Amino acid sequence: MEFYTKAGSPEKQKSGCLVLGVFNGKKLTLSGEQADGEAKLISKILKRGDLDEKAGSALMLPHLPGVAAERVLLVSLGAEKTFNAKAYRSAVTAAAKAVNAAGVTEASFGLLDVAVPECDMQWAARTLAIALGEAAYRFTAWKSQKDGKPVLQKAYVFTPDAKALAMVKAGFTEGDAIGEGMNLTRELGNMPANICTPTYLASQAKSLAKAHKLKVEVLERDDMESLGMGSMLSVGRGSVEPPKLIVLKYSGGKASDKPVVLVGKGVTFDTGGISLKPGAEMDEMKFDMCGAASVLGVMKALALMQLPINVVGVIPATENMPSGSATKPGDVVVSMSGQTIEILNTDAEGRLILCDALTYSARFKPEVVVDIATLTGACVIALGGVASGLMANDDALAAELLESGQQAGDRAWQLPLWDEYQEQLKSNFADIPNIGSKGAGTITAACFLSRFTKDYRWAHLDIAGTAWKSGAEKGATGRPVPLLVQFLINRANPGTRSKRAS
């Protein structure tokens, strides 16, 4: 998508649609007042009460005399006294959906002329750009008849003054990059599992590295056997698809800067193995690699933004299938760390591939490590699709991630990682079982992972409830790319944090 900043009167800008914000009480923002002109046609329409006052409500109008745009879209900002980041995000999201639903390819936006409390203009522009990128996404790779309706390609945005111009442009650069990263994550997540195999993920990583001058390495089964990754390899034993350990390196910081390591769970299809899942909704287990997809999405966003930070992406990728060679409940495997693991349930496989990837990550001498995984159904029960679960062995790191999620509108909620929960992980036959006793499934899964993260500061994001949607809107969401990119922006530019809080 192309973004252009504009000065002057919005009513003179030719485009498929002019988008204007309206506060409760029929109060137009500056752009709206300019477009209203002497005729006050927009004000007269608002007096009829056709626009709901809830933030994010929208009303599409046909061509209005005196306005060069083919349509005018009025979007409610809610009450001016309580206007905040959430209301602004609701408004730009609704606007983005409406212009794309109308098949508009060029639109003008008068939504940057209102101050969002505790947020700067760069944040506002970035949020708008992300919303536009999200709404324009279509998954059509496997449809024989494509949706012929066009999507938004050019966005013109009116800036309130010349001083804001640089911030708006910087916000668009960030937002467009984050949107591109989210849409790559969504595209990979939505791919059918017969296409998106571990080998396919590796090929996508190589293509990303080639396009953006990243370093990439793909470890094969023999490499993992040499490293002693018995836990990782145990998950893929029932599949004909070979496992891969994918390593991507983005070097935007100084050579001496320690990297942030992102570890993404990449189970490209999860049947549960011998502990077979129920058949209902098993098709959605193609989304079990969304942690891996989010790491690739973040790496793409970083490359587009040229963020001054070093980041390593580590992706353990495999299938989990039942067969005569599959790992069985009761088997004991040896992890790369040397700890032995009793497999009580082969459907608790994500932690088995992550633990070896986390051990492997120590070789990069990381500043911090964050793993991202669609790990537990218990997290869906606890938090639904609103917030990702967050657990960490360092509260300062957890606070950074929580703040980043709040800023990005991609929130997480911290759960405890107390020693008392470790008591649930006891085995009579190995050092540790791969599941705990009944209760607190999300926390005991993180407790398991914590056994492999003693050498560095670490956080775990359980995205089982946020990585995709079911039902009529079934599909990958692109989360938590916004949270992670915001986290990296804050780390690369620590002086900007207070200016962008929301």
Image (tube, grey):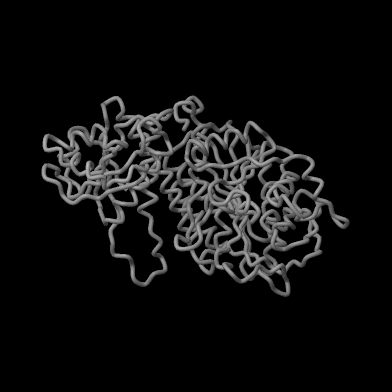
Could you tell whether 371 is left or right of 338 in the image? left
Which percent across, then down, holds residue 67? Answer: 14, 43
Q: Is residue 81 left or right of residue 307?
A: left
- 451 up-or-down from 23: above or below: below
Residue 329 on image: x %, y %: 78, 65
Residue 406: horizontal and vertical position, in percent?
Answer: 51, 37
Q: How many marks?
A: 0
> What residue appears at the point 38 percent right and 59 percent down from the top-left corner?
138
- In x, y percent, where is residue 34? 18, 34
Residue situated in front as seen by the camera: 465 or 346: 465
Which is nearer the eye, 79 or 331?
79
> Looking at the image, which residue sits at the far right?
428
Q: Quadrant of residue 403?
A: top right
Q: Quadrant of residue 377?
A: bottom right
Q: Nearer the viewer, residue 403 or 39?
A: 39
Specify whether 221 is left or right of 98.
Answer: right
Q: Residue at x 29, y 25 (%)?
A: 163
Q: Does residue 131 appear to the left or right of 217 in the view shown?
A: left
Q: Residue at x 48, y 26 (%)?
A: 498
Q: Nearer the viewer, residue 250 or 48?
A: 48
In the current view of this chain or complex, which residue is farthest to the bottom?
Answer: 324
